[in-house]
Amino acid sequence: MNISALAPTHDSGHWYRRDGTRCQEIISKTTSLPRRPNLGDARKLGLLPGVTTICKIYPGNGLQNCSPEILSAASDIGTRRHAQVEAFHLNHCTRIDPVDGPFLEPYYQWFGNTVERVTLAESVAISLDHGYAGTMDLLCVLKDKRVAVVDLKNRKNLATYDTDAMQLAAYRHAVGAGVAISVVLGTERPEILVKEWGTAENELAWLRFGLCLQLWKSATNYYPEFWEPNGEQE
């Protein structure tokens, strides 16, 4: 079996520095212009692959049947609405937006009924031991005093996928605590789906994420947990 054929393109996806900052661009030595980081850069700088990059390996990610146009439009909506929710988490105020406001209202209502306080919002969770990182939408304390990791999605159909649980499992493992909650908002109607993943589901999700992570490492022959400052692996 050609393992490399199962992994996503090595130059694509999200990369993080070991201090938790997102590495979105590298200045090219040949052109002095910014470019996207690639696997070669990761080897030199010890960059960590993003959680979503690893989850793309999993066959049940819910995206295979979407055309590029649909994915692009959904990404635009998701980015715009995520920015507004981030501002809400950080500033405790909602933006009056005639386009997105009605679609975000179900989330604001759920938040008000469920969340006691925000601990972190749009914060990077790092696992140096396992060699990955990712950006959590929300780490919070619920009104029942439990710590929760919350991941927000915007979708045409209200549904959750295995990769949703895998993302949350990776974040939970990195921060060392929290129940896992997926929140899905409708992109065509103001509606919401909230799913708290159970213990067995979380254990299975962590297993699946771990398998995808090992496959990615094998396919790229890059093991970030063994990276040394001189750019060589042990």
Image (cartoon, rainbow, N blue to C red):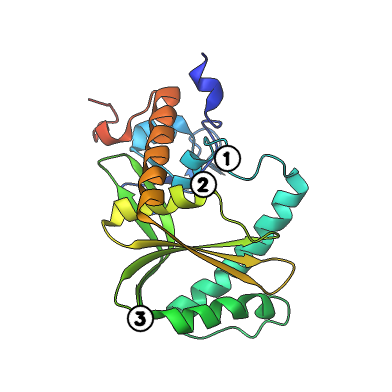
Residue 196 in the image: state x and y as whole percent.
Answer: 44, 63
Q: CA distance from mark 2 to mark 3?
A: 27 Å
Residue type at the position of mark 3: Lys
> On screen, 137 above or below 95?
above
Q: Name the residue carrying label 3.
A: 143
In the orientation shown, which residue stands out farthest toward the top? Answer: 1
**In this figure, what is the number of numbered marks?**
3
Residue 84 in the image: state x and y as whole percent.
Answer: 57, 74
Q: Is residue 161 visible?
A: yes
Circles 2 and 1: CB atoms closer than 8 Å: yes
153 left or right, relative to 204: right
Q: Name the residue carrying label 2.
A: 162
Q: Name the residue carrying label 1.
A: 60
Q: Residue at x 43, y 56 (%)?
A: 135
The answer to which of 87 and 146 lies nearer the viewer is 146
Which quarter of the image is occupied by the C terminus?
top left
159 left or right, relative to 222: right
- Compare marks 3 and 1 and give the one earlier in the sequence: 1
Q: Residue at x 37, y 54 (%)?
A: 171
Residue type at the position of mark 2: Asp
Q: Secondary structure at mark 2?
A: helix
> On screen, 139 above or below 198?
below
- Compare marks 2 and 3 and give the one earlier in the sequence: 3
Q: CA distance from mark 3 to mark 1?
A: 33 Å
Residue 88 in the image: state x and y as whole percent.
Answer: 50, 79
